[in-house]
Amino acid sequence: MSEAKRAEESLVKSLVIAALDEKIAFQKKWKRVAMVSYMITTAGTILGATLATILGALDFSKAASFAAGTAMVLVSLEKSLLLREKWKFHLRILTQFESIRFGVETDFVALSDAVSRTQAIMEQYAIEVPITERDVSLIKETIP
């Protein structure tokens, strides 16, 4: 293989790795955001429900209702925002990008295959990102 061809392959390889590094950083960030949000809402729900039970048993009904309401809001946020599912989703996508990057770095995966797999993951990401579905009939009912 000529020196020019090796230099070109090296440049392409470094560009592919740089692109993968950007995607990995993005997925790590959103995995962390989803994980921390899920942990906070879950721990808050458990603490709020426990506190409501204890305060209710001690005849602090207003404080118990506030704690129960807080727990209800936190569990509603977690369920409606699909935080656990988003955490798992970003972890899966991150792992796929890291796998491709490792294959490129070790020359186990051809650059053309790495690009194709990355494109497929990006398309998959756009289609599968966890978003709660809305009932269209509710929208129609509110429009005069």
Image (cartoon, rainbow, N blue to C red):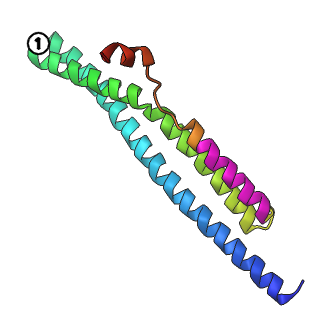
Determine which quarter of the picture holds residue 105: bottom right
- Residue 142 in the image: x percent, y percent? 31, 16
- Residue 9 in the image: x percent, y percent? 77, 77
Q: Residue 140 lies in magenta, yes or no? A: no
Pick the residue in front: 99 or 46: 99
Pick the residue in front: 53 or 85: 85
Give the labeled residue for mark 1.
61
Q: Secondary structure at mark 1?
A: helix
Q: Which residues are magenta?
A: 111-125
- Residue 110 in the image: x percent, y percent? 81, 63
Pick the residue in front: 9 or 61: 9
Tell me the kind of residue under disc 1: Ser
Tell me the quadrant of the picture where the C terminus can be found.
top left
- Residue drawn at the location 64% of the way across and 56% of the way down: 98
- Residue drawn at the location 54% of the way across and 62% of the way down: 22
Query: Left or right: 141 with respect to 31?
Result: left
